[in-house]
Amino acid sequence: MGLKSSEAPLLSIIVPAYNEAENIPRLLERVHRALQGISYEIVIVDDGSPDGTSEIAKGLAVSRGYPLMVLQRRGVRGKVSALLDGFKASRGVYVAFLDADLEWPPEAVRRMMDLAITEGYKVVVGYRRSDRRPFLRRVISGGARLLSKLVIPGVRGLRDPTSELLLAKREVIEGARIRDWYIKPFLPVLAKVDRKDVGEVEIEQSSRVSGESKFRPFWILEYLVELEEVSGHVVLKVVFAASLGAFAANLVSPIIGIHSIFVSLGIRAALLFKIIGLAGILASEAISLLVKFLAMPSLGLLGWILAAFLETLTATILRSE
């Protein structure tokens, strides 16, 4: 089902959906109210929802006159794949991406659009004022934000570079390499655009109205791989260079090898200082060293991995916004 008008709207809103039949009517009504006076279109990409998501959306387009396009896909092919297909089908000068579960308020898109026009931003990203999700999800999200800032210099000044509420000019998205298995699809956009061209809008995030969260634990591993790609494999390069340097130092002299430990600590402190402050650095390093001391004799390499995880977790909890 497509739109009839030949004139491209100012704004396209891409909404990936799977089993969101209960949320779609609320979403469309709130978007329509918020975008009064703006030419817009909504592109809903449905991954074959068995609950009638597409049919409900199409019915509302007819009965309420919403400027709506529904793309029906066979099988569950994933959120980012849906975003990319929706983007290809859209026509707007600006493109916004909005989840169907109403955790991100549709009214935020209007604020983001107004900011982009008045300030001339190429990209506007929404960040949470408060996160109402379960504690573990908040910790995971905090870790994801911290890691992105550590390995991608271009996003360090942003409050939440991993946000999934984004509005951007079409050409900016076209110039970014977004792969359909990425967990945070807009990191490539934010990593490429100049910081001065990015605006931020504070959003009061709501709890999911209905339906179930799509989060899966294995996404954490995929996110780490994504970070490596988007950053130009900076972590692998640093780890390789540090390991090679430490190995060479130990060959020359054990004393130099010991000094290399302090060099490693200094590098990490320099990276973390602006994010978590001196107190956070000391706390995270103390926990890391304690775990290494207690776990290394019995766990070996696994002890180092556990220590690194706890160090990152501590840094995330203590980070300064």
Image (tube, rainbow, N blue to C red):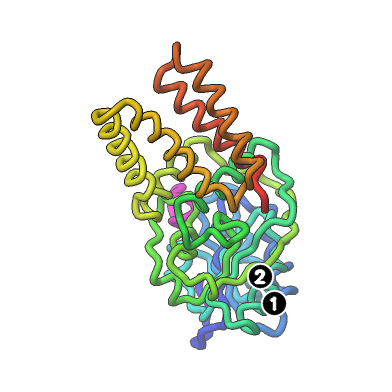
Residue named by callout 1: 35
> Which labelled disc corresponds to residue 130?
none
Dominant secondary structure (helix, strand or loop) of the stretch shown in magenta: loop
Q: Nearer the viewer, residue 291 or 181?
A: 291
> Where is residue 251, by image quadrant?
top left
Q: What's the residue type where badge 1 is placed?
A: Leu
Circle 2 packing at 10 Å, graded few (<14), some (14-19), many (20+), is: many
> Which labelled disc corresponds to residue 109?
2
Judging from the image, what secondary structure is the residue with disc 2 in?
Answer: helix
Q: Nearer the viewer, residue 187 or 315?
A: 315
Is residue 210 depicted above or below 13 in this figure?
above
Is residue 238 depicted above or below 311 in this figure?
below
Highlighted magenta segment, given as a residue range: 73-82
Q: What's the residue type where badge 2 is placed?
A: Val
Residue 87, how many percent across, how many down? Answer: 46, 68
Count of marks overlaid on the render: 2
Q: Could you tell me if residue 212 is visible in this image?
A: no
Q: Nearer the viewer, residue 124 or 191?
A: 191
Judging from the image, what secondary structure is the residue with disc 1 in?
Answer: loop
> Where is residue 299, by image quadrant?
top left
Q: Are marks 1 and 2 in contact (CB under 8 Å)?
A: yes
